[in-house]
Image: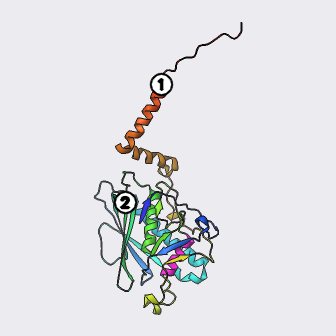
Amino acid sequence: MLAFILCLAACFSGDVAVGQGGDTYSLQLQGYVWNHSTLSALVVTTENESWWNPSYVNDTLRAVGQWNNALEAYAGNYTDYAYLANLKINPRVSSEIRPGYDLYISWVESSISNMSDEVGLAQTFIRGDNTIINCTITLAAKTNHGVALSATDMQNIALHEVGHGLGLGHSNYTGDLMYSLYRLGDSPVAVSTLNVYGVAAVFGWMPNPSGFLPISGWFKQNSVSLSAQNYGYLWVAPENSPPQSLADNVVVQFLVLMWGLLLHPEIGLPVAGLILLFVVLVLIPRKRKPTVKVDS
């Protein structure tokens, strides 16, 4: 799940694999695995709702495309994990829920929780042997303060939740896609080497499918960390990069966010009071000091 507060960054780098405070970059795993490598995703539209924006579909399809790009790039760069080239997510768009899909992606109008501003939630359903049946992903169109998510926000959040759908938990690094907090209006984010390294562990049965069961015999990790690999961000195809428009400008997004917050009385009234006090203090005429003649 993803709450909106802190930030993610998105540019390719080859930084040393050391996280905050000198700790190693690490990523939690959910402990569940898929038993097939071609995953189907159903993107369910909500066209009869007044808050619905058709662009949400393209934002989400680009997020799925980013994951496919990253898996392919990682497989090409690290020969030990070349099997990930055969891991794909195939999306389909529908106006209604249909059975038989692995991932289900849909939207609600506002924050998923009234207690915190959760704008994304992934729920994984499993069998008794820890294989995944399916995963439902819910994305919010607005925060609980009524601030609408931009195209970049929607894509970043969908990217994070699809990561959960692949079996990943949360990262310990604030700059990573799978960090649990997100600052609304931030830059586009990319899939990291840490993220795909985690996916490689979840799909570690792929080189030897006959040894898939029992899962407890090979999948014993509850987290992964980078040691021999550098932490970096993986390639994104141009068609899967978020579109840049005036609405995606950081200054514009900040102003829109502030305006949305000020519309709420519990925030707007105190701010208006402070502004009024400032204006009054500025406009109150000051007592003029007497002047004297210093020379003739």
Which of these two is toward me, 211 or 95? 211
- Kindly identify which numbered label has been placed on residue 140: 2
Q: Residues within 10 Å of mark 1 (few under 14, many from 20)?
A: few
Q: Name the residue under label 1.
A: 283
Q: Give the answer, above or below, for where 45 lies relative to 37.
A: above
Residue 16: image quadrant is bottom right
* Residue 157 place in picture, x, y as percent: 44, 63
Q: Which of 189 and 123 is in front in this view?
A: 123
Q: Which residue is drawn at 33% across and 54% down?
A: 51
Q: Residue at x 52, y 50 (%)?
A: 250
Q: Quadrant of the N terminus?
A: bottom left
Residue at x 57% of width, y 74% of height: 73
Answer with left or right where residue 226 lies relative to residue 109. Answer: right
Residue type (three-letter) at the residue carrying disc 2: Ala
- The crowd level at tag 2 (other Cα within 10 Å; few <14, some 14-19, many 20+) is many
Which quadrant of the view contains residue 30? bottom left
Dot 2 falls on a residue whose secondary structure is strand
Magenta-highlighted residues: 192-202
